[in-house]
Amino acid sequence: MDELRTQLDSYNIHQNTIFSIGMFDGIHLGHQHLLKQVCKIAKNNSCKSGIITFTDHPRKLFDPSTIIPLITSVNEKKTYIENLGIDFVIPIEFTKSISELTYEQFIKTIINSANLKGLVLGPDTAIGFKRLGTPDKLKELGNELSYEVFNINQLNFNNKRVSSSLTRQAISEGNMDLSTQYLGRNYSISGTVIKGKGIGNPVLGYPTANLDMSSVKTIIPANGIYATIIKLDEREFIGATSIGYNPTFKNEEKSIESFIIDFNENLYGKDIEINFVKWIRQEESFDNTVELQKQMTDDINQIIQLFKGKN
């Protein structure tokens, strides 16, 4: 309890607050639906609104070999939640000691450290040791400890519940149309631009911004060519982004390279955000650079026409 209390106390929450608790990876439409309800319920009860989330997926604690790539980094998630009007966003580190707290201990700590007055639950919320804190149990505890429980129905899309798992699957398959529908926005990754192999400009005539792969902290879409929007500081540019191994040059290391249309600046060392709008084609191996250059020109023309159609 002490570890959770320490993390919560650092936020100095003294107002009565309506909370929801969860991983909230991606802040997809289902999450947005619930978060808007948190804001509404808080306002109706003259309370502040708060979210307790986790810095990494809790499943990793129980099975370190489990690979669950995140859709949003902690900072991105915090920003998205705050932009929906939530007053307090508390990312906590899910440690072994916290995982062993009963749901009663977990809730009592939030009451004492963050003035919990109401708890908003999604359709599959369960908290505490062995996930024994089901909605019914949390409601019983609420009657005892004087906090109210609000149950929110799930949000469906094409008769499927919108979930982080489905969103993650769509991204990993390169289905950006579907991931955009789940998220309500284009999926994006962020990273730092580094010097590449020097092929794009001198060999192909298309200089590219190459990301440092170690700087990308979220799930990378399937290999292929994408129509993208590149964000640099407060500016936006149209781009063609390649993910993969550049099979024509037989690269052994995966790369993310973006040709930014109508752009001619040095980006080395700068952070950019790549927003994936549409999957264009699979990566291919060409017999020579002339054929590759022709295909790149076709890709870029297709992407330009795509964005003209969106305006």
Image (cartoon, rainbow, N blue to C red):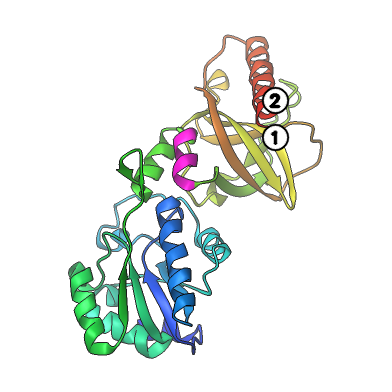
Who is closer to the viewer here, 24 or 129?
A: 24
Residue 142 drawn at (x, y percent): 26, 82
Residue drawn at 54 percent across, 45 percent down: 185
Residue drawn 48% across the image and 37% down it:
221
Q: Which residue is mark 2?
A: 304
Is residue 203 in the magenta section?
no
Q: Secondary structure at mark 1?
A: strand
Label drawn at residue 4? none
Tell me the crowding category of disc 1: few under 14, some 14 to 19, or many 20 or more residues within 10 angstroms, Cα based.
Answer: many
Q: Position of residue 140 (x, y in %)?
A: 19, 80
Give the alpha-carbon distance from disc 1 to disc 2, as whole Å.
Answer: 8 Å
Give the residues in magenta: 177-183
**Is residue 32 rendered to the left or right of residue 269?**
left
Q: Amino acid at mark 2?
A: Ile
Residue in front for this viewpoint, 16 or 229: 16
Q: Position of residue 311 (x, y in %)?
A: 70, 32
**Above or below 237: residue 250:** above
Residue type (three-letter) at the residue carrying disc 1? Ile
Q: At 51% across and 46% down in the image, what residue appears?
A: 184
- Main SS type for the magenta part? helix
Placement of the N terminus among the 4 image quadrants = bottom left
Q: What residue would you read off at disc 1?
A: 238
